[in-house]
Amino acid sequence: MSKAVINQGGGALNHALFWEWMVGPTDSNGPSPALKGAIEAAFGSVDEFKAAFNAAAASVFGSGWAWLVLKSDGKLAVTTTPNQVNPLMASVVAADAGIPILGLDVWEHAYYLKYQNKRPEYIASWWNVVNWERASAAYEAGLKGEVLL
């Protein structure tokens, strides 16, 4: 896959998904029972998942994304990608590949005006606007081998 396709196509896809993964602060009821159960099976609890996701997001050097993905074995995992790479792209290292269930843009442009260089504060605040209904729908689609775009 060419660098231009990764940068432009990945950027368009990632950001289209990113806006769908957020809602108003009181507009979400948390993960569906199915997604919550899968998160608990993979991470122990929703709080432990959030801690793992936050750590991954904070660890991205420079620009990139943190992801909750559904792996080909049907299990959830947290991963990161650089720049505009999406876990669906063939160029992704096999260990990082998966169907995106939830993703967070950790490029500075996503948070700098409000949080300056305080990426961990941005990450923590993002959980207040996560669209769990959309993430739950992506998980259900992923279980069927489909990608909710």
Image (spheres, grey):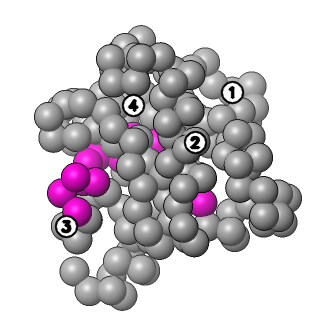
**The residue under label 2 is which amino acid type?**
Asn
Mark 3 packing: few (<14 Cα in 10 Å), some, or many (20+)? Answer: few
Left or right, residue 114 beside residue 10: right
Q: How far apart are the alpha carbons under marks 2 and 3? A: 25 Å
> Residue at image x 31%, y 33%?
76
Residue to which mark 4 is pinned: 137
User: Picture coordinates of residue 136 (x, y %)?
Assistant: 42, 28
**The residue under label 3 is which amino acid type?**
Ala
User: Picture coordinates of residue 94 (x, y %)?
Assistant: 18, 57
Q: How far apart are the alpha carbons under marks 4 and 2? A: 22 Å
Q: How far apart are the alpha carbons under marks 1 and 3? A: 34 Å
Which residues fall within the magenta stretch? 93-106
Residue to which mark 2 is pinned: 54
**The residue under label 1 is which amino acid type?**
Asp
Residue to which mark 3 is pinned: 90
Mark 2 packing: few (<14 Cα in 10 Å), some, or many (20+)? Answer: many
**The residue under label 4 is which amino acid type?**
Ala
**Secondary structure of the residue carrying numbered label 4:** helix
Residue 148 visible (yes or no): no
Residue to which mark 1 is pinned: 27
Task: Tell me where residue 144 sits by quadrant.
Answer: top left
Mark 1 packing: few (<14 Cα in 10 Å), some, or many (20+)? Answer: some
Q: How far apart are the alpha carbons under marks 4 and 1? A: 15 Å
> Residue at image x 45%, y 34%?
135
**Which of labels 2 and 3 is toward the front?**
2
Whichever of labels 1 and 3 marks the residue nearer the N terminus, that label is: 1
Whichever of labels 4 and 3 marks the residue nearer the N terminus, that label is: 3
Q: Are marks 1 and 3 in contact (CB under 8 Å)?
A: no
User: Which of 88 and 82 lies nearest the eye of the viewer?
Assistant: 82
